[in-house]
Structure formats: structure tokens, C-alpha cells
Image (cartoon, rainbow, N blue to C red):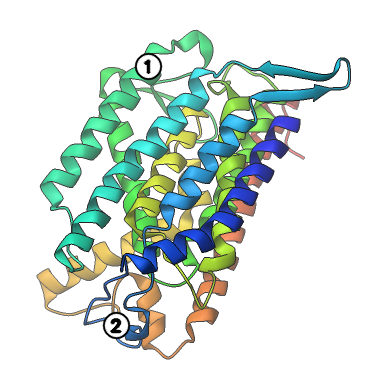
Amino acid sequence: MISLLIAAAVSLAVSIFGTPIAIRLLRERSVGQFIQEEITGHAHKHGTPTMGGLVFVGAALIGYLASHFRLWSFADGFTFQVNSFAAGGLLAVLAMVGMGAVGFLDDFIKFVRKHSEGLNKRHKFGLQLLIAIVFALAAMQSGPSEGISTEISFVRPLGLNLGIFFVLWALFMLTGAANGVNLADGMDGLAGGSAALVTGAYTIIAFWQFRNPSEYQALDPLELAIVAAAMFGALLGFLWWNAPPAQIFMGDVGSQAIGGLLAALALLSNTHLLLVVLGAIYVAETLSVIIQVASFRSLGRRVFRMAPIHFHFDLGGWPETTIVIRFWILTAMGVALGLGLFYADFLVMTDGVLG
């Protein structure tokens, strides 16, 4: 528990005090957001500093590292000790940093070109595929005895073993989560606030798995909880400056890193499909785009005023703050339902009855 508190507190402090420094540096270098012309009512955001994801990803890494250092203990008083880094935590960090690096490259190209179009889809997918392969193979090498499973799972494995095709499943999870968060990152604080709720949920889930070992145990659940807690604290600190009206945007480096981490937490904790419930808002954002494109191409008609769906409400006259807060509330409802399902399954497995 102390490790979790250290990770969250350190990352929160680094993020909340480091973000204004980043805002100043990014403004000095004219690293600003490019707003698409078709998005009406948001032209005033053009030029707002972006790539803020570098701050909270860095803060989460610092918090994760700090949690492994011990300067004092109840038994020995002042001491210096470095706890070992376990595979689960390192794999989660790999997914977060790897996907974040793809997002950074996308943001950097946008900055160089002075345009909203960055890395082309083929190159972006290729880099994401590379990260997914490295992540999946490294996870599979951790060994079934340590908890990693190549079976598709909800709150525990469902019996459908993918074997080597787990690599494709990891790619689907990583890219799906990253793109979902990226689509939600269209309004001040929308992606950051919802991601804080989901990472908070995974902190609880992973720590619960650590305290209540089972045959469906996650891979190094305490390490997963520490990484999730570090990102939770980092996102809260960033949200202080990213909440409406935002003084900085996370950029693709932030949304891709968040999506990569959420997918990794789901894969490593054997709660793959539970992420659909916890991150239901990202699923809704993605589905709205798919439905819009399919409807327009097949019928020549649009289902929504604009996709992703938060812009549908924006063009309907809802104030941005109202949309963001209501989407946070919907995310909180998904998180509550997801945690409820997770705990209900725990009761069934331990007591044989529900309730």
C-alpha cells in the first residue's frame, strides 16, 4: 500500500508542478494545437500548447521509479533500499512508453508540417504492430505459472486459448484502446478525466488481486497496481491544467500512452473484456465514428451531426463543460459497474454464491 501511495503522490507532484513549466516552454517554441476547420466553435484553441502527454507520462515513470526506493522503514528507521522491478510493471511501462513514442512522432510531424495531419496510417500501424509483437512475446515468455494467460478473459480467462495468435489480440487491444482514447481527446479534460477514473479502477483491481491470490492471478499484480496508481496521480496533476478551459493539451503522445497502458493493464491482469465496461466511453466514441462512416458510405446519410459523438452534442448546443462533465459521469458509472462485476465474480469464486 505504501508503494502505491508513493507512486501516486510523487507522480501527482511532478505533474502538477511540471505542467506549467511545460506550458511555458512549449509556448516559447510555438508548439501549439492545430484545429480542424470543420470543428466549429473551437477556433480559439488553435495554438494552445500540446504534447502535454510528455509531462504526465514522465511523471508516471518518475512515480513508478520512486515507489521502488525505500529511505525509511518502521523496523530499521532510516535506510536505503531499492526493490526489484518485476516483469508485470515493466511490461505495462513498455506498452505505455512504446505507444506514447508513436504518438510523439505523430505530434512532432504535425508540428513540423504545421498541419493537423501527422504520421500516415500505414507507418503508424506498423509501429503499433511492432510494439504489440514485442509486448505480447515478452508477456508470453513470462510463463503461465506466473499468471500471464493467452486466453481471452472477462474478469478471468474464458477458456478460449489464442496461443500464438495472442499477438494479434494484443495488437487489437493496444490499437483499439489507443485510438479510443485519442478520439475522446477532442474536448478540454475529456480524455484526461475519464482516463484517471479508469486507471484508478485498475489500481483497485490489481491491488485486490495482489491481496487475494487465485489461480487466475495477474502477472505481478502489485507492480500493475503501482503503475496504475502512478498514472492516476499523474493524470490528476495534468488535469489541473487541462480541465476546461484547457491551458495545455495532451496530444497524441498522451492519448496513445494512456491507451497502451490501459490495454496492457487489462491484458496482464486477465481482465481483457472488462476494459470494454470500464472504458465504455472510449468504445462509444469509436463506435460513433464507425457508424458514421458506414452510414455515409452505404446510405449517403449521417447518423450524427459529427463524429466522434461528443461533437454531436457540441453541435447540438451543449456547452463544452457540460459535455465533459457528463462524459466523466458516464465513465464513473462504467467504472462502478466494472468494479461491481469484478467483485461479484470474486464472491462467486470464493464462496460459491453471489450476495
- Residue at 32%, 64% in the rendered image: 29
Q: Is residue 182 above or below residue 270?
A: below
Give the residue type that dot 1 points to: Met
Q: Residues within 10 Å of mark 1 (few under 14, many from 20)?
A: some
Q: Which of 354 and 185 is in front in this view?
A: 185
Q: Which of 268 and 246 is in front in this view?
A: 246
Q: In terms of sequence position, does the residue under pointer 1 or pointer 2 come before the other? A: 1
User: In the drawing, does residue 61 fall left or right of residue 29?
Assistant: right
Q: Which residue lies furthest to the bottom in this view?
A: 317
Q: Nearer the viewer, residue 148 or 10?
A: 10
Kind of element beneath mark 1: helix
Q: Mark 1 points at which residue?
A: 140
Q: Can residue 342 be seen in this view?
A: no
Kindly identify which numbered label has been placed on residue 305.
2
Figure quadrant of residue 69: top right
- Residue at 13%, 53% in the rendered image: 120
User: In the drawing, does residue 109 fall left or right of residue 178?
Assistant: left
Give the residue type that dot 2 points to: Arg
Q: Position of residue 344 (x, y in %)?
A: 68, 39
